[in-house]
Amino acid sequence: METSSALGRSRAALRVDGAGLGRLRRAREAFFANAAGARDPGLRTEISQSWRRSLESGVDPNASELPLLDVGGRSKRLRAAAEPVMRRLGAQLEDSRAWMMLLDRECALLSPVVGDTEQCAIAANRGAQPGALFSESKVGTNGSSIATERFEPFVVVGPEHFRECEQMLVSVGAPIRDAQGRHCGSLMLLCRVPQASSVMLPFTCNAAADIEDRLRELAAGAGRELLARYSRLSVRPSRAAIAVGDDLLIANRAARQLTAHGVGLESIAQRALDSAQETDEPEFEITSADGGEGRLQLRVSRVTLSDGSVGAIAHLLQPASPARRRGTPNSDPLEMLRRARRAGADACIVGEAGSGRRTLAVEACAGDGVTFDARLAERDPDAWLMRLRNAAGTSPAVVIAHLDQLAPALAAEIVHIAARSSAWFVATVAGTTVGAGRSPMDDHFAVVTARTPLRERRDEFRMIVARILAEVGGAGFDELPTRCSPDALAALSRQRWPGNVSQLRRVLLTAAMRASTNEIRLEDIPPSVLVDARAGATTKLERLERETILEGLRDAAWNRDDAARSLGISRATLYRKLKQFEISIPSSRR
């Protein structure tokens, strides 16, 4: 392409004549005076929608600062591919009064601005440095934010920008796709309105295409490099092995055969790649869910490729982590309690509220225990203790739930009763420890086992759900579903469950009541439960956005095209949000 002196030519295609700018300013003033009103016919739909989204995201139209984030280790392949192209663009745009930016898929600036020296300096002084964010949710409408939103080139002219400080700019955004056709970033060309030209759009698109060509070349080279490393490291065909990079997944026959047993190779490969990208260790071990109820132990070799990206080569060590196998002294709390009972040692179960401590204690008693709730003792302590003494003299086993909530005097009396009884006592306590021997109660309950919180019992989750639904059916709700669909079960298993098994039981009962078939489906699960999956790592706005998308999908019977239209976003944006918020589409609706 010729040098960018061409940028000073025709402006007709960009509609930057005085009359057009005046209409845009009036449309802008009308919008901010009444954002809920009808769209001005002189304003493009894409712009008015972007303005509304910017307002909803809390962007201040009068602000001028640029938010920053750390982009040190991000988009290495994109940077490597773009480096010679950006260097060439910098030379072409010299003395053009225009400047160019390379952004990642979140519209974060990856490298210094290139182009006209004076304008680059002004942009840098304003905060346009690596890490500066130009996303719609942070700075409002611009060429790159809409190009990212719509996944197509877009031009934003003067007053179409959301923020006041950008009213005299023209910005052109062009998305960049990687070798797999996935959105990985964008280019944004900017200049002031008087210098705008009709060639800005093709100029930016051509530059983006040049970067895409480089990405394909680097991906092919990296793929060959990773394959060569895999061939050298995987010398035993009988040992399951995979190699994974940004654009490549290789599995030997032994690894592919695992899929017949329900092992999800793609999820394991992604786990290995994510782990490799998060560490500098050349070799390490990880444990990964196998897609069913088991876990796999893998040895992973981190591979740094010539294009700057990171790959991983993983070998299967054994089908399950020893720490999770049944029968070892500390791995199975139920077996540990049974051993304590056989030895005549009273035991204590610690754990989070709702994690199933009482259920575990009752199960350890094998049906011949009597249960007491220590929280009820304060109503009539003498009567409660009398019933406990009677049970200690007549029952083989006694369960005391919430022992930690007893008054110290009552707790000491329980120790006195238990020490003189032939019954086996098992108690439950909130927290992670009984107390390190600071009281007679701590000394008496010498065997302590922990009830793991539900979020850490992924390998048991399917069985826990089945047991709860069976209990619901046995409690007189025999017309309710007794199983979950695979989509519903997968969605439930990804939740954090701060309320543990108690919360899961409530959710399953609610979903069962909502179900219209003989199984609980994804659409039967309350949306608020699914929103909680990322509650600890998201903002309130993101949680609201996720719930809105879920409601839109439900209202559209999970049809993604209809949902995108009703939500006022593009199909590409909806797909991106589905991945970002880990929303699963029921298999019957795909």
Image (cartoon, rainbow, N blue to C red):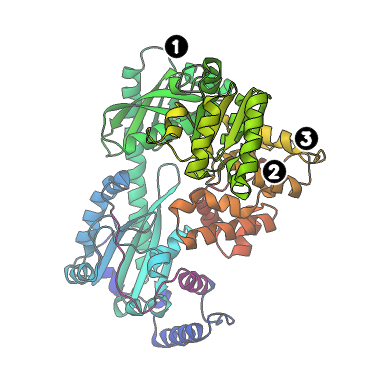
Classify the position of the C terminus by image quarter: top right
At numbered mark 3, what does the secondary structure look like: helix, strand or loop?
Answer: helix
Name the residue at 40% across, 77% down. Answer: 12
Horizontal side of 281 relative to 18 (left or right) equals left
| Residue at mark 2 to residue at mark 1: CA–CA distance | 39 Å
Q: Nearer the viewer, residue 564 or 413?
A: 413
Whether 55 is among the magenta residues is yes
What amino acid type is highlighted by mark number 2? Answer: Arg
At numbered mark 2, what does the secondary structure look like: helix, strand or loop?
Answer: loop
Frontmost of labels 2 and 1 is 2
Frontmost of labels 3 and 1 is 3
Horizontal side of 280 relative to 245 (left or right) equals left
Q: In this figure, which residue is indicated by the disc labeled 3? A: 474
Residue 440, image x and y in percent?
A: 43, 33
Disc assigned to residue 296: none
Classify the position of the N terminus by image quarter: bottom left
Horizontal side of 510 relative to 437 (left or right) equals right
What amino acid type is highlighted by mark number 3? Answer: Gly
Q: Looking at the image, can residue 134 be seen?
A: yes
Q: In this figure, which residue is indicated by the disc labeled 1? A: 238
Dot placed on the residue nearer the N-terminal end, 2 or 1 = 1
What amino acid type is highlighted by mark number 1? Answer: Ser
Q: Which residues are magenta?
A: 46-70
